């Protein structure tokens, strides 16, 4: 189901909504959610993201300037000390058109120590990784749920999803960029039990 995409303007607060904005759970980590869209339709997705979504009614995007200014305000309020800006969404943050600019702007904020990003990497490529590295991205939390091509497609409910490409990109991250890699599988009991040890071995 294709949903309309709404731009969140400054009349709407970026605090208090899970789908977009900034989430502060009372630690030094701030979750940054500039967009809600996702190219995959993972069968285990807790937010029912992706082109095959059954219940989503709308998607959201936050202008770069607005989310950066709100981030600065919250970082200052929290004391501007050892802050991690974790770009995660109810979809995949790589769909955000200004993701590189966002990483760069967040990295320039006083008190920010780490910029991390959560992704399945399905629409990543080496050029984008180079740009993210140059922009100041500290770490990628790379989600992979199976090393088997057929099972990976089944779990993503996306025929074009290529786990081999994702594995190559992870090797590229560790060998060709300054970005740290965290491999972050989702264990779905009864579906990918045998894959978790293999993913650990790959990591």
Image (cartoon, grey):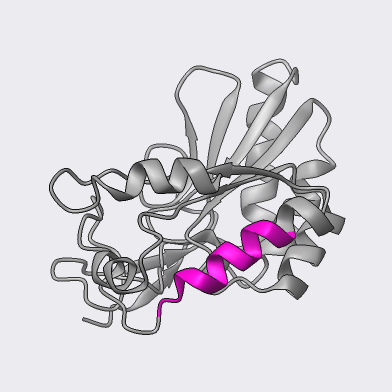
The percent position of residue 183, horizontal first and vertical second, equals 53, 44
Q: Residue at x 83, y 48 (%)?
A: 178
Query: In the figure, 131 relative to 127: above or below?
Result: above
The percent position of residue 69, horizontal first and vertical second, equals 70, 45
Query: In the figure, 86 relative to 11: above or below?
Result: above
Residue 91 seen anywhere in this rendered image of the structure: yes
Stretch in magenta: 161-172
Q: Residue 159 lies in what quarter of the image? A: bottom left
Closest to the observer, 106 or 76: 106
Horizontal side of residue 197 vs 142, given as left or right: left
Q: Residue 172 lies in what quarter of the image? A: bottom right
The percent position of residue 11, horizontal first and vertical second, equals 49, 53
Q: Residue at x 21, y 66 (%)?
A: 56
Is 167 a magenta residue? yes
Query: In the figure, 138 relative to 144: above or below?
Result: above
Q: Residue at x 53, y 17 (%)?
A: 27
Residue 14 seen anywhere in this rendered image of the structure: no
Is 144 a magenta residue? no
Horizontal side of residue 15 vs 83, given as left or right: left
Q: Quadrant of the C terminus?
A: top right
Closest to the observer, 157 or 92: 157
Q: Quadrant of the N terminus?
A: bottom left
The percent position of residue 184, horizontal first and vertical second, equals 46, 43
What type of secondary structure mainly makes up the magenta span? Answer: helix
Horizontal side of residue 165 vs 92, given as left or right: right
Query: In the figure, 187 relative to 94: above or below?
Result: above
């Amino acid at each position: 189901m294709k949903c309309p995409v709404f731009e969140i303007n400054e009349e709407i607060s970026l605090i208090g909504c899970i789908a977009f904005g900034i989430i502060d759970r009372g630690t030094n980590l701030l979750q940054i959610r500039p967009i809600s869209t996702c190219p995959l339709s993972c069968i285990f997705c807790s937010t029912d993201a992706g082109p095959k979504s059954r219940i989503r009614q709308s998607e959201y995007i936050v202008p770069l300037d607005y989310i950066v200014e709100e981030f600065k305000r919250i970082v200052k309020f929290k004391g501007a000390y050892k802050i991690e800006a974790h770009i995660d969404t109810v979809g995949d943050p790589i769909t955000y058109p200004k993701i590189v600019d966002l990483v760069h702007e967040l990295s320039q904020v006083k008190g920010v120590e780490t910029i991390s990003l959560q992704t399945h990497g399905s629409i990543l490529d080496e050029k984008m990784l180079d740009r993210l590295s140059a922009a100041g991205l500290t770490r990628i939390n790379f989600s992979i749920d199976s090393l088997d091509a057929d099972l990976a497609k089944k779990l993503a409910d996306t025929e074009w999803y290529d786990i081999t490409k994702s594995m190559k990109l992870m090797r590229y991250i560790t060998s060709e960029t300054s970005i740290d890699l965290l491999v972050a599988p989702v264990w779905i009991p009864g579906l990918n039990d045998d894959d978790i040890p293999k993913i650990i071995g790959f990591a």
